[in-house]
Amino acid sequence: MSYCKLRHLLQTTFQQRRLVPVIVAVVVSRLLIISSLYFSSSLLRPGNFAVCNFSLCYPHYEPYLSLVSNPILGPFMRWDAVVYLQVVISGYSNMYLLPEFPLYPSLVWFVSYLSKANPAIVGILISNALFFASMILLFNFVHNRFGDEIASWTVIFASFFPSGIFYTTAQSESLYLFLSLLSFWLASRSKIVSGSIFGFLSALTRAVGISLIVPLTIYPLKQRAKGRGLRILVGLVAPAAGTALFAVYAAHKFGSSVALAKGVLQLQVNTNFGLPLNLSDWNGFLANLVRSYRFYLFPSMSDIGQTFGYTLAAWLIPISLSLAVLSFRRLSLAEGGYALVVIAVPLILNFKNFPLFFAMTRYISAAFPIYITTSVLLSRHPWIRLGVVVISGAAMMMVAMLFAQWYNMTG
């Protein structure tokens, strides 16, 4: 029944031309990103922090360097985009590939196998198509509660978010956003089992997919229906099962029961970071925290790209966390809790790891409720929301240019 309603809703949306803002926002933002990629890769010289020769940093990827230097596809193929391509072509040949969860490369492999097309091109097309589909879902998800205007501006804020580059290149963000929105859409309509299926698939797409436990357990708590306890259990188990399934595969592949943890954590956790166990150590810990964050807010570096990356992340983090907290009141417990977990977990793990802090802009983008909250808060302030879009769009173009210059925006 929910799928029929979704189809009817989409048909009605197209008939009433409600999708005009969605189409304009997606097309304009993608054109800005693509033009920034080509401008940066063709006309700008690499900065001091444009990370070392890729073949030296990642010798396992040597066979893919010709693709990286391709004048057409090259600007899209940086860092994790190349890693995903290796998984598509060669599978999980080493443990360093495990942070790239399997559903997206499997989808790219399947489509490229059927079409006989270049998997890099297929990956780029899939990401952009799924981003457009995600914006349609996001529009309808918000429209049912807040109307056309707030729904339209939510899509605009999402389309011009600074980390938009990751929804344009061959990476898993678009697929994850699409699946997580489907999970929310179904769960909010009492279809917990159906929503949990997409929660399971989301957890096979990105590690953050396990965060969908939050909405998939909160929604059935608020819904009075038979079998509520079973629904809560399904919502709790499904995302965890997705991660567990990949963990079992990794354990079998590499002969270690903790292979997935080793593969993911060695790239995403600075082992020097941790909360002090002794209460007497808290003063020193907090003082170091303040000093570190002050450096991020106002870094003094010779490389303008590095300075911009750290400063952008440092300012986006408190803004996004504030919006996540406000989502509890403006939206719902499920949406606020999900946004807070999505932002807070990678922040705690990566705070003192410079390259990964640099990539917090990417991690924040998965917390889609913050776009809705921003639209709600600024609904009576048209000039402010226009200014936010302009500033965010300029930052989005700068991030795309840094990405093309091999700055490690991916984490």
Image: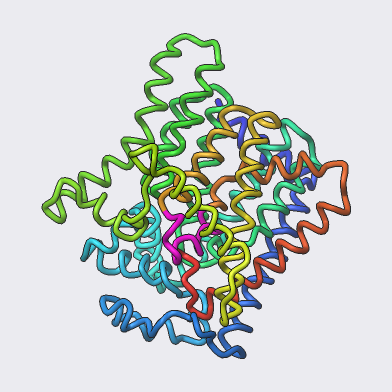
Residue 395 placement: quadrant: bottom right
Find the magenta span and give its range. Answer: 350-363
Quarter of the image with the C terminus in it: bottom left
Taking the image as shown, residue 140 lies to the left or right of residue 364, namely right
User: x, y percentage for residue 88?
Assistant: 32, 65
Name the residue rendered at 51%, 30% in the picture: 215
Quarter of the image with the N terminus in it: top right
Name the residue rendered at 51%, 85% in the picture: 48
In this picture, is 162 found above or below 404? above
Residue 127 at least partly seen: yes
Q: Relative to the observer, which residue lies in front, 146 or 293?
A: 293
User: x, y percentage for residue 398?
Assistant: 64, 72
Q: Relative to the observer, which residue lies in front, 52 or 375?
A: 52
Taking the image as shown, residue 242 lies to the left or right of residue 404, namely left
> Is 354 colored magenta in this rendering?
yes
Q: Furthest residue to the front?
A: 280
* Color theme of the render: rainbow
Q: Magenta residues: mostly which secondary structure?
A: helix
Q: Relative to the observer, which residue lies in front, 232 or 311?
A: 311
Q: Furthest residue to the left?
A: 255
User: x, y percentage for residue 159?
Assistant: 67, 57
Name the residue rendered at 52%, 80% in the picture: 405
Residue 100 at least partly seen: no
Q: How many marks?
A: 0
